[in-house]
Image (spheres, rainbow, N blue to C red):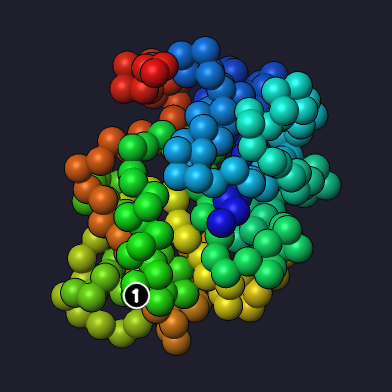
Amino acid sequence: MKAMIFAAGLGTRLKPFTNEHPKALAPVNKRTLLEWAIRYLQQYDIHEVIVNVHHFADQIIDTLRENDGFGSRYYISDERAMVLETGGGLKFANSFFKDDKALIVMNVDILTNLNLHQLIAFHEQNQAAATLAVTKRSSSRHLLFNEAMQLCAWENTQTKEQKNARNESNLHPYAFSGIQIIGNELLNNMHHEGKFSIIDEYLFQAQHHSILGFDHSGDILLDVGKPESLEKAAQLFPLG
């Protein structure tokens, strides 16, 4: 199985570091976030990665080249012309994985001890179109699932804006962990075009397909989006 690492973002929350560097190269205990992501995937026998780039793209490409992909085979999806967000970036890179049964996708700024083998097994057992890792935690945005953990809606908890995919009640809010498995059928039949969020695609697909949540509450999960989170990451993820 291959993986795609989203590394094209501007990383505005990590300023001033991202004034001169891409977020993917922010350091945690002498490793960049990109290296942490690649080595995390290697723990689960995933040694082939696609990395999308936009902001200071050359720095990411040079880092991968100089370190021989940190031991993994790597491909670059070049979005320097225009950053395409998560859904658009995934669709743009489709030629790298269009024949694969499924793809693991993760944000470069996520550090976690989520067991990917368990996530993959859940996805395969349930024959889901996509499986999203989620946890019970406070967030400005929640995904809403029914009792069967099928995605039904998205909600902005601050503005109360809501986007619905299934007309169901008694929904349960979870926060997305930035890690997912996407099946071949969804990958090759994405509805949206151009620049768009993968969440909008999931909500569209959830009207007719099984988009499931995988609850891994209790695992370590850190969104390394702000300078102070780099300090916390250094404490939670020491070098082995």
33 relative to 150 in the view: left or right: right
| Residue 61 % position (x, y) | 76, 31
- Residue at figure coordinates x 72%, y 28% from the top left: 68
62 relative to 212 in the view: left or right: right
- Residue at figure coordinates x 49%, y 78% from the top left: 205
- The answer to which quarter of the image holds residue 90 is bottom right
Tell me the quadrant of the picture where the C terminus can be found: top left
115 relative to 26 in the view: left or right: left
Q: As rendered, which of 78 and 99 lies closer to the eye?
A: 99
- The answer to which quarter of the image holds residue 112 is top left
Q: Residue reaching furthest front?
A: 45
| Residue 16 % position (x, y) | 58, 18
Q: Is mark 1 on a helix, strand or loop?
A: helix
* Residue identifier under label 1: 126
The amino acid pointed to by label 1 is: Asn
195 relative to 82 in the view: left or right: left
Question: 52 above or below 63?
Answer: below
| Residue 202 % position (x, y) | 48, 70
Question: 32 above or below 114?
Answer: above
Is residue 188 something one can see in this rendering?
Answer: yes
How many numbered discs?
Answer: 1
Q: Residue reaching furthest right?
A: 81
Tell me the quadrant of the picture where the N terminus can be found: bottom right
Is residue 163 something one can see in this rendering?
Answer: no
Q: Dot 1, crowdedness within 10 Å: few (<14), some or many (≥20)?
A: few
- Residue at figure coordinates x 20%, y 80% from the top left: 169
- Residue at figure coordinates x 45%, y 38% from the top left: 43
Question: 232 above or below 53?
Answer: above
| Residue 224 % position (x, y) | 44, 30
